Amino acid sequence: MLAEQVARSLVQRAQELFDARVFVDAKQLAVEALVKSPKGAAADQARFLIKSINQQLGITEEVEPRVDLTPIEDPTKVKAPVVPVAPEGVPERTSRITAGVHSGLYLGLLGATVGSFLTPDDAAGGAIPVGIGAGVAAGVYLPKLLDRLKWNEAQTRTAGAGTVWGGVLGGLFADLGKKEGTTSREVLVVSSIGATAGGLGGAMLARENRYTPGDIALTDTLAGIGAVGGLTLGMLMQPAESEAYSLNAAVGATGGVIAGLVAAPQTNTTPRRMLRVAGTSALGGAVPFLLYAGIHDPSKTRDERIVGALSSAGLVVGAWVGFRLTRNVDRGRDVLPGARSSHPEDAPPALLGRNSDGRWSLGSVSLSPLSRRLAPQRGMALSLIGGRW
């Protein structure tokens, strides 16, 4: 009875506010009255009042509050819901996809190399079908075998990136080995050797679990920009020998890998962000080639030099624009759970640091003011090597 009396008072006050066209406050009191006494006589008046207020406010769908009248169970007898937990060691779906792509590329390269020797007169006749078959089979079945390693997404990307860039550098160096007459078999053989060596190096780096998927995505992006930039710089240089293009691309890719591995731990990058950065960089490098069709002159090299210079600059400017536009994308998500959990990271700030467990690693640029006791003039000191024992 007391609840019904309170509900009537609330409805009466709500009616007064409704007449004064203070609809929001009137609805609030009507809802409180309905909650206070959901089955009393005041409830019907409260419902009618809420419906009228909704019409005045332009709310077409009436949402009536529901009061849960189920008795509360004893907290000591309530059992916690069972949350399904994924079996330990089963990789995420993205890791299997990544493992399948990299496995297919690597085994496809090895298959193409072997297939090129099966048809002596036509290297492509054996390389193409064998390479495709080996790549598809590896992409489907090899990730299941790699599950035993219990690697996460970042570790899979690290080893896979090693095979990719090792193969690219191997193919480029194969072209540099001979001034003329480099065959496709030679390129495939050296590329396979480079992919294998790069994969072993990537696997060793992956075991340390020091990089996130975003770190490897940044490394891949910088290496790709370096490789393409080396080719566009070759257009600007117009070298006497075509092998200079391969040398430029090899130097650019190597520099991109090194820069990525050093800078990645200091950045906030994710694969999704780097996909956008790579897209803007590629767009900046491709746009100048639209000019090439209008200024092409077979008798001169000026057109190639202009397009090469603009494309090289476009790659850099496009990457910078991409980083600027995506600076707030996935902020704080470039984290590798469990990384370095068993290794202390207590090396002093320096370019090269030694942790207390004896592990050496690349650090960051560390500048500090010069000690006035050691040097009378003002200045800054750059720490090259730091260690802790």
Image (spheres, rainbow, N blue to C red):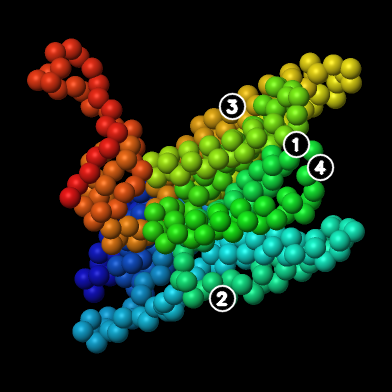
Q: Residues within 10 Å of mark 4 (few under 14, many from 20)?
A: few
The residue pinned by badge 2 equals 145
Which of the two labelled residues, at mark 2 and mark 1, occupies the earlier sequence position?
Answer: 2
Q: From the top left corner, tell me how far across and down residue 52 is, in percent.
A: 49, 55
Q: Residue at x 89, y 58 (%)?
A: 122
CB atoms of marks 1 and 3 within 8 Å: no
Which of the two labelled residues, at mark 3 and mark 4, occupies the earlier sequence position?
Answer: 4
Q: Residues within 10 Å of mark 1 (few under 14, many from 20)?
A: few
The residue pinned by badge 3 equals 317
Q: Quadrant of residue 33?
A: bottom left
Q: Amino acid at mark 4?
A: Gly
Q: In this picture, is 147 found above or below 55?
A: below
> Which element is circle 1 on?
loop
Q: Quadrant of residue 36?
A: bottom left
Q: Quadrant of residue 268?
A: top left
Q: Residue at x 30, y 60 (%)?
A: 341
Task: Please state if 259 lies on the left or on the right of 74 as rendered.
Answer: right
Q: Amino acid at mark 2?
A: Leu
> Which element is circle 4 on?
loop
Which of the two labelled residues, at mark 2 and mark 4, occupies the earlier sequence position?
Answer: 2
The residue pinned by badge 4 equals 181
Which of label 3 and label 4 is nearer to you? 4
Q: Amino acid at mark 1?
A: Lys
CB atoms of marks 3 and 4 within 8 Å: no
The residue pinned by badge 1 equals 179
Which of the two labelled residues, at mark 2 and mark 3, occupies the earlier sequence position?
Answer: 2
